[in-house]
Image (cartoon, rainbow, N blue to C red):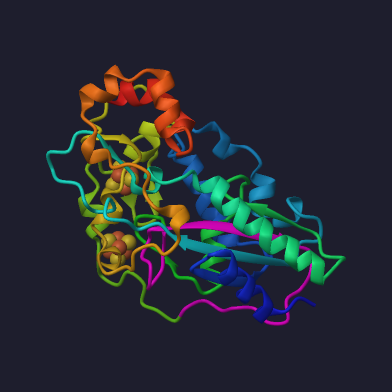
Amino acid sequence: MLSHNAIKTLATEAGFDLCGIARATRFEQNELAYNRWLDNGYDSSLEYMRRNCDKRFDVSQLVEKAKSVIICAVSYKSDISGGYSSDDRCKIASYACARDYHKSIKKMLLSMLKQLQAAYPSLQGRAFVDSAPLFEKQYAVEAGLGWIGRQSLLLTPEYGSYVLLGELVLNQEVDKYDTPLQTTGCGECRRCIDRCPTGAIVEPMTINTARCISCRTIESDNNAAIDLHGWIFGCDECQNACPYNKKAKPHNSASFDPLFDPRTISPEEWVAMSEEDFSTRFGSTPLKRSGLERIKKNI
Ligand code: SF4
Ligand code: SF4
């Protein structure tokens, strides 16, 4: 049986700000809510959201005989988070101004897994960072990291919603599991819903991706006209409105230091940029995923 304390220590050493441990399980309420969301067509052009639902609902299809899920979170809050003025026309979500978190977090998780496997040779497991269908936010809730806010993101008391998540799914039990926080969560607050410029939060915890600027600037193929309100990659408006984020601690880890400041790059500079220049300046950031052409189109 794996040691709860040893896992927490490894997570801290790997650079995570938060770590919780939950039993691998099915979440029936989440399954129902997810299917309702699909039935309403809120996935819009994100066809991959309809694929692999069997795995999304049953983590043992990702890791055979999965018993435990370790959820780790790391803060990325910087002075860019919440730092835009209403005149800025080339806004980029603050997580995307740092090194691509997929790589940074995967490396942190794999270092934990390697050390766990050295201590427990029969341990099998996999590391995930947005790379598999998994109810990661619900696992984070079960593991006591926070609650799901009305903007549909995980909200933690200490670091707000400016956190990135990664998971280890393991085939062994842990000697102690964490429990959900005792909290009133968002309470009466609705600031994120009121602040969303496109009305994409159609009801608490329900996003219509056809209207969400974050989806539309990065991954959606939907061409229907929508005002992007100066965002050219991602959107932080609902997060910036959140009182928990205003008082959240800044990030600790150098891996999440911003590599550039979007407020210093004009629309003209973006439009004139060559692919080569883009690769040199932004090749290690998440901007690389959607590419320069898409950014130009968004501008
Ligand atoms: S990311 Fe932007 S568009 Fe999407 S729900 Fe939040 S505020 Fe609305
Ligand atoms: S803005 Fe208010 S309602 Fe929205 S996530 Fe933050 S606390 Fe919850």
Whole-percent x, y for residue 125 in the image: 76, 58
Q: Residue furthest right?
A: 122
Using the image, determine if residue 223 lies above or below residue 182.
above
Residue occupying image coordinates x 32% and y 56%: 78
Quadrant in the rendering for residue 227 = top left
Q: Quadrant of the N terminus?
A: bottom right
Ligand 2: give its quadrant.
Answer: bottom left
Quadrant in the rendering for residue 10 = bottom right
Image-based side of 205 in relation to 191, left or right: right
Image-based side of 86 in relation to 172, left or right: left
Q: Nearer the viewer, residue 72 or 259?
A: 259
Q: Quadrant of the C terminus?
A: top left
Predominant secondary structure, magenta span: loop
Q: Residue furthest left?
A: 87
Whole-percent x, y for residue 62 in the image: 73, 51
Q: How many marks?
A: 0
- The reply to whether residue 212 is visible in this rendering is no
Using the image, determine if residue 29 lies above or below residue 143.
above
Whole-percent x, y for residue 256 in the image: 43, 53
Query: Does the magenta portion include 165?
Result: yes
Whole-percent x, y for residue 254 in the image: 44, 57
Q: Nearer the viewer, residue 246 or 223?
A: 246
Residue occupying image coordinates x 55% and y 46%: 102
Query: Does the magenta portion include 290?
Result: no
- The reply to whether residue 91 is visible in this rendering is yes
Q: Nearer the viewer, residue 37 or 120?
A: 120
Residue occupying image coordinates x 24% and y 53%: 82
Residue interval drawn in magenta: 154-181
